[in-house]
Amino acid sequence: MSVGIERLAVYVPAYALKLEDLAAARGVAPEKYRDGLGLGEMALVPPCEDVVTLAATAGARLIGAAHLDPAQIGMLLVATETPVDHAKPVASFVHGLLGLSSHCRVWDLTHACYAGTAALMTAADWVRAGGHRVRRALVIAADIARYPLGSPGEPTQGAGAVAMLVDAEPQALILSEDTGVHARHVHDFWRPLGRREALVDGQYSIACYLDALTGAFTAFRALERPPFEPGEAFTDRVAHLLYHSPFPKMAAKAHRRLVEIDWRAAPGRVVEDLDTAAAASFRELVAPGLEAIARVGNCYTASLYFCLAALLEAQGRRLGGRRLGLFSYGSGSCAEFFSGLVPASVAAVSDAGVAASLARRTYVDVAAYERLARAPETGGDPPPGFAGAFIFEGVRGEQRRYARVGI
Ligand code: HMG
């Protein structure tokens, strides 16, 4: 049975900040954010949006685009590290807003940026397990990345949601069954209870990410079939590689590490200048998947799947019949390397909504961004031109209230 992602739909919140404006306000050379981190813009949420509205809007877009009867969804998994309640999952709000069946398993998964992959793998295994009923799972990865104002992490903030329909009719990506996993208890990035902004040991987090990539990719490569021909590398077998991208330069560092492991493990492969060859390989295999995320920033567990949606939307037809490699990293930590085959019918998912979402945003200035960052989450009215499907109205009687406004 082929199991994987039938289609994807994304949602990016209504506001954005240009990082050249942030650089000017922080007295930083704009090249540091643009070239040093690879970022151009960050997505921001207006007061009427939170992780529930991001997730629910992506889910509503996917259900609409797939012309899906919500009753066909037997599992709803929301992956997020920025929930809105200690007990009630984001998934239960989303379940209600989307009008899903009561015969549906509903829960949240949290493991920093890895949770989206945990949800995807859980859903795929559930579909593979079969049963009398056709199994379709809705997996939504959604997050709002916040770091303290003025901190090194500040330019890497972002927000967004990606919804994926997982079933036995994958038209976007057929998932490989063999994956490579690497888990290790580290304190590289965390968010103590009661804090809205994450704490991070930045350079250490980069080292942890690269160690996890080494572990996960080495485990994956050992399972690769058919065996490699002399001189053949895994990078020869894929059209593109997608990495969890807290900032695009991280994907460049990751790719440099991967090719070093991969090419050194290919007996007879001669590489004269590893740095130059790795940079050329990055431009061909990785850079095309990073253009959109550079305008969103880190959307934590949605980041990898945002890159996938953007790549398929921009280049889907060309990729039909080709293979992709994907690396997921969540601080704390757990990482997974896996691959997927883009089916020939990929044209069906060429409208994930990435370009449309990015085109409809309102740019705010740094003063407005700082007001938003400091404001308590009170909910509010949708701004002019709002493209989301749901708004967070506010808290009444200690309960969060939402309303449908679009789609
Ligand atoms: P920083 O203090 O800005 O670091 O923090 P930097 O001084 O090393 O500068 C960054 C890059 O800009 C360097 O490039 C500089 O050379 C370059 P590199 O040497 O790394 O290639 N640079 C310039 N380039 C051009 N012109 C200039 C210039 N000046 C400097 N004028 C850091 C960077 C990433 C640490 C910080 O932004 C941070 O703490 N970010 C948050 C943590 C993070 O994203 N970690 C990534 C790995 S962990 C992960 O991905 C998990 C995560 O998503 C969370 C989860 O799992 O939920 C974060």
Image: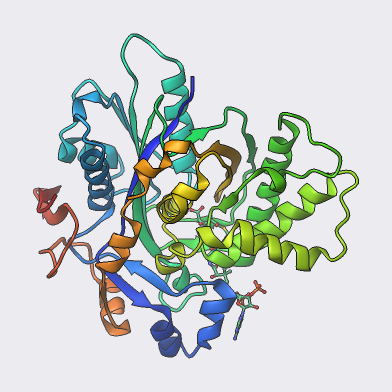
**Residue appearing at x 32%, y 17% in the figure:** 134
Task: Classify the position of ligand 1 by quadrant: top left, top right, bottom left or bottom right.
Answer: bottom right
Q: Nearer the viewer, residue 363 or 95?
A: 363
**Residue appearing at x 25%, y 56% in the figure:** 50
Q: Position of residue 254 (x, y in %)?
A: 65, 57
Q: Position of residue 180 (x, y in %)?
A: 65, 36
Q: How many marks?
A: 0
Q: Is residue 248 above or below residue 268?
A: below
Q: Is residue 39 left or right of residue 177?
A: left
Q: Nearer the viewer, residue 316 or 219?
A: 316
Q: Is residue 235 left or right of residue 293?
A: right
**Residue appearing at x 77%, y 68% in the figure:** 276
Q: Position of residue 349 (x, y in %)?
A: 36, 44
Instruction: Look at the image and tell me whether residue 194 can be seen.
Output: no
Q: Is residue 305 above or below residue 96?
A: below
Quadrant of residue 32 in the image? bottom right
Q: Is residue 370 above or below residue 44?
A: below
Q: Is residue 111 above or below residue 279?
A: above
Instruction: Look at the image and tell me whether residue 368 can be seen.
Output: yes
Q: Is residue 285 left or right of residue 235?
A: left
**Residue appearing at x 51%, y 46% in the figure:** 319
Q: Position of residue 113 (x, y in %)?
A: 48, 49
